[in-house]
Image: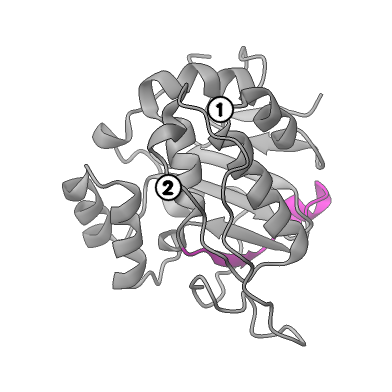
Amino acid sequence: MILVLVLVGSASCTSDPSDREGAGSVSPEMGNSESPSSERSSPLETGAPIEPDKRSDKCSSRGAPGALPGQALPEAVAETRAEIAQAAWACNYRSLGELALQGSDWFVYQAALREPGPGPFWQRADRCELSLNYMISVLSVPFVVEETSEELLQAGFGEELYKWPSATSGSATSDDWQAIRRVFPGNKKLVNRWQEQGDYRGFEVWISSNGDWVLFDDYSVPFDRRCPRR
């Protein structure tokens, strides 16, 4: 299997949104301060902004936002989001790889089976596609919540998937697309094309409601790259 690396600025649309494994029904789209489910007995409180404990200039995260806005998330999801961001700010590929491999039976990322794991892959990929920059940038914008598919429930994930960015929703608003322009400031034409097609094709982060990190992937590459848990 060939390693696939696609620069976002020149991404080609290669898959249909319905081909995504694990997709469920989309709930009403979420902003940074809204409760992620209208069915909750009590609304979630928006957490405090997240600032880096340590910041390194040795990887692409040096160009990422300097803090994450507070968002209304379950505690387990909020903790994982913060851990991902802290490890990315610090350019700590080992910690990122460990986070990816915790919990359920598999993690999805864009790599060939010969890769030793997501941490080493991201260290390699970061040199050409700014992976850690986008990892943090995507987590800084609004999210959506989807019901977890039966397949993912059986794999040990929680009942809901928290997905960044909110533009992954089929009912994305103009505000959602404005957030994407902040993630890809140098790719306005690409984002405009995505918006016209109603089809976001950039990086995504998924976190299960039980706090398990499910995915960090670029929608412009085939979605069949899995990292078996070791």
Is residue 58 within the magenta segment?
no
Q: Is residue 155 above or below residue 102?
A: below
Query: Can you see residue 221?
Result: no
Q: Is 145 within the magenta? A: yes
- Amino acid type, mark 1: Cys
Q: Who is closer to the viewer here, 26 or 208?
A: 208
Residue at disc 2, secondary structure: loop
State the image coordinates of residue 146 (x, y, percent, origin top left): 61, 65
At a point 64% along the width and 51% down the height, the residue shown is 81
Read off the residue under disc 1.
91
Q: Quadrant of the C terminus?
A: top right
Q: Position of residue 184 (x, y in %)?
A: 30, 46
Where does the image place residue 119, in percent across and percent down from the top left? 63, 23
In front: 146, or 9?
9
Q: State which region is magenta.
A: 142-157
Residue 198: give its label. none
Q: Residue 55 or 150: which is nearer the viewer?
A: 55
Describe residue 10's horizontal placement relative to residue 212 as left or right: left
Furthest-left residue in this view: 189
For residue 65, which numbered disc appears in the image?
2
